[in-house]
Structure formats: C-alpha cells, structure tokens
Image: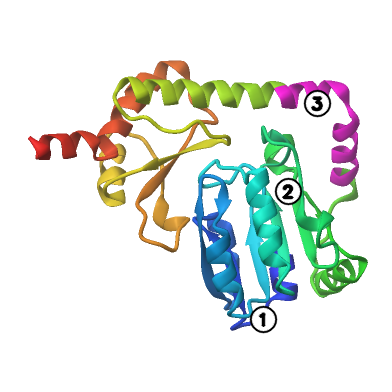
Amino acid sequence: MNLLVQTLVSPGDRVIIEDPTATRLLDILDNVGAEILPLACDDQGPLPEVLSLLLEQAPVMLIYQPRTHSATGNSISPARRQAMAQVLQQSNTLIVEDDGIGDLSAEASWSLGSIFPERTLHVRSFSKAYGPDLRLAVLSATSEMVRRIQSWRNFGVSWTSRILQDAVAWLLEDEETQRQIATARATYRQRREALLAALAQRGLDLPLRDGLSLYIPVTSEQFAMITLAARGIAVVPGERCRLGPTQFIRVSIASLRDEQREMIAGALVIASGREFNSLADL
C-alpha cells in the first residue's frame, strides 16, 4: 500500500478514505502530503451519498477495505457494493482495495475490479493469516499500473525474497495449512463472541462483527485509556484511526485468554463510560 500510494499520489492530491480506517493508511497518506477526504460509513460500508459528494472534488484515488474492516470489523454488504459501483460509474477516480486481513476474514473475497478493471487496484495481505514475518502481499491491477509501480520500486534497494514468495505459494496449496487457517479463523471468532457475551452480561451490547479486535464506542477516549491503563490493559484509541469526532477504542481479541475475559469485560464496561453515565443520571 505504501508503494502504491507513493507511485500514484502526489503532494496535494485529494484521496478519499473511509473514516475510521487503518492507522497505517492515514500515516502513508500523510507522509506523501495528500489531502485526505474522510468518507463516512455505517455498518454496511461507505455511505454512497457521501461518496458521491466527495467525488465532485476530483480525487485521484478512493481507498477502502472491502471485507473485515481493521477498525470496525464491518464488511461491505452486497447491496452497498452495488450502490458504490453506481456512484463510481460517474467518475474516473482510481479504486484501491486494501484486503488487510486476507484469509482470516469470515467473508468471501470480492472486488470492484470485475466492474472497473481498468482502474481498480486490489491488495491482499498474507501477513495476518500466514505469519507477520512474511510481510507479503499481492497486487492485482492492469499491466500498465503494475509496470508503473514496479518501476518506482526499482529506484529503491528493497526486493521481495524469492524464498518467502515460494514459501507462501506452497502454504496456499498445502491442505494442512489451510485447515490450520480455518481453525485460527474459528478460534478468533470464539474469543470475539465470548468477550461480546461477557460485555452483554454487564449491559454493554455490541453487534457481532468480524476481525481480530472489537470496536467499542466510549464517552471519552482519554477516560477509557486512563481507566484501562490503571488495570494493566492496553488498547488502541480511536484517534489513531479516525478523522471525525466519534470516540471509540479498539480492543484486540487475538490472544485473549479465558481466565482474563471476565476481568477485562468489567474494565471495558467502566472504560466505555456506561457506568459513569448511569451514576450521573441518578
């Protein structure tokens, strides 16, 4: 994604991106000096009417996550995909799809490239599903786009290890590896659902989403961070992922142990501000 943005975006170019989004994407755009246009979303994905208004500002690129959003856990619904496609018909903006969670997603892979093949770039990462040390992703785009990106990359001194490429190619075809990926996907789902159930028992009901973290709305991110830090719990504040004012925290469930769950659930309810608000209401 960094290479793609460096190649195709110049300082001052306008880029539409979901709000909230992945922290790394905001950092990448800030690094190249892009003007960021935040795209509001709901639980089905980007809002078409907002996308339509932003496209009037002649952005060079739209960046979005097609499945299992890293910040919210949402995936774009089929109806929303169709609505996005209708809006994008009226523009020539490049479409960049960042599939960061890859094969750990509960949703099937899809791409607007089937509708806009000439201007869609799809990036799928293997790092989360097959191991962070791989640091590998695959780019799908037109041959002209791929050549431009490869040419820019050749100015640097980096390359992708053939050993790692061959390793991933083997893992993708290995049946035992694919069974382990399925097991990991199921394990993360169980941990996520168990924490959601523990929160619901304490009166904090959240929708069932996908991913390696929970999106939890809070009254104050600062209050939440301080409250959780005092209990030895580290989370990601929403300010690192958002452009708008919505207050939330991201809570990883990837390595959550059963014996930690009840303590963490209780702390999260307090951190959300729910108990504080209830006392204030009294």
Give the CA distance from mark 1 to mark 2.
25 Å
Q: Residue furthest top?
A: 259
- The picture quadrant where one finds residue 52 is bottom right
Residue displayed at 69% across by 36% down: 107
For marks 1 and 2 on the same chain, the one whose residue lies earlier in the sequence: 1
Q: Amino acid at mark 1?
A: Ser
The span from disc 1 to disc 3 (Cα, nearest Å) is 40 Å
Foreground: disc 1 or disc 2: 1
Which residue is labeled 3 in the image?
178
N-terminal of the two: label 1 or label 3? 1
**What's the residue at 90%, 31% (across, down)?**
173
> Three-letter amino acid code at disc 2?
Arg
Q: Secondary structure at mark 2?
A: loop
Image location of residue 271, percent across then percent down: 28, 38
- Highlighted range, magenta: 164-182
Residue 10 badge: 1
**91 or 173: nearer the eye?**
91
Q: Residues within 10 Å of mark 1 (few under 14, many from 20)?
A: some
Residue 25 covered by magenta stretch: no
Q: Which numbered disc, 2 or 3, marks the residue that appears first in the sequence?
A: 2
Q: Which residue is mark 2?
A: 135
